Image (cartoon, rainbow, N blue to C red):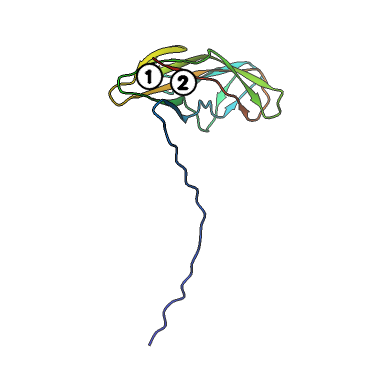
């Protein structure tokens, strides 16, 4: 006669999340991320292309690993509804120390392989959905302070 092996039980915690969406909603799927960069004594920039999400740099900026990509949004409304969408042309991101900043300019809205600058009139189609992306250029000073920079911008959607 043999005995049964000992039984071990373990527990784990997990989070659940859900988002309810109304008929006229804007949902942020992904943030505009410039990723990790290495500044030098020479100013430069990092560009996120709204059309394809490619990240490039100029001047004294070296691209490093880390999540980078264009912002991604979905607009929900009625079938075949027309919307007008706008964003600012620039914004500021601030270091966690509260004093150092970088400017993002050349912000643009995209849809597919198209770039609409800061304004687009979109057609929601039969499903009432319009997907768009946001890109721009991060301007990095020579010897930019290392650390995390963040900021927000306002997207305005007018349902016509």
Q: Alpha-carbon distance for marks 2 and 1?
A: 9 Å
- Residue 119 pos. (x, y %): 44, 12
- For the residue pair 23 and 88, the one nearer the viewer reads as 23
Q: How many neighbours does mark 2 have within 10 angstroms: few (below 14), some (14-19), or many (20 or more)?
A: many
Report the residue at 41% width, 30% height from top: 22
Total number of numbered discs in the rendering: 2
Above or below for 2 versus 91: below
Outermost residue on the bottom side: it is 1
Report the residue at 63% width, 19% height from top: 102
Q: Is residue 126 left or right of residue 6?
A: left
Outermost residue on the left side: it is 126
- For the residue pair 92 and 56, the one nearer the viewer reads as 92
Report the residue at 47% width, 43% height from top: 17
- Residue 25 pos. (x, y %): 43, 27
Q: Is residue 59 visible?
A: no
- Residue 7 pos. (x, y %): 46, 72
Residue 134, numbered circle: 2
At mark 1, the secondary structure is strand
Q: Which quadrant holds the C terminus?
A: top left
- Residue tagged 1: 111
Q: Which quadrant holds the N terminus?
A: bottom left
Q: How many neighbours does mark 1 have within 10 angstroms: few (below 14), some (14-19), or many (20 or more)?
A: some
**Who comes first in sequence, dot 2 or dot 1?**
1
Report the residue at 53% width, 14% height from top: 88
């Amino acid at each position: 006669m043999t005995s049964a092996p000992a039984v071990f039980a373990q527990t784990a915690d997990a989070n659940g999340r859900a988002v309810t969406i109304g008929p006229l909603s804007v949902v942020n799927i992904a943030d505009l991320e410039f990723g990790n960069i290495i500044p030098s004594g020479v100013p430069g920039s990092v560009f996120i292309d709204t059309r394809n999400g490619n990240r490039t740099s100029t001047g004294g900026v070296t691209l490093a690993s880390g999540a980078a990509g264009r912002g991604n949004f979905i607009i929900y409304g009625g079938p075949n509804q027309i919307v007008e969408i706008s964003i600012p042309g620039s914004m500021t991101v601030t270091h966690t120390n509260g004093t150092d900043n970088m400017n993002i300019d050349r912000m643009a809205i995209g849809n597919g392989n198209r770039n609409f600058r800061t304004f687009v009139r979109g057609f929601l189609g039969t499903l009432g959905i319009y997907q768009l992306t946001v890109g721009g250029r991060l301007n990095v000073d020579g010897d930019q302070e290392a650390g995390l920079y963040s900021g927000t911008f306002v997207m305005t959607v007018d349902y016509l």
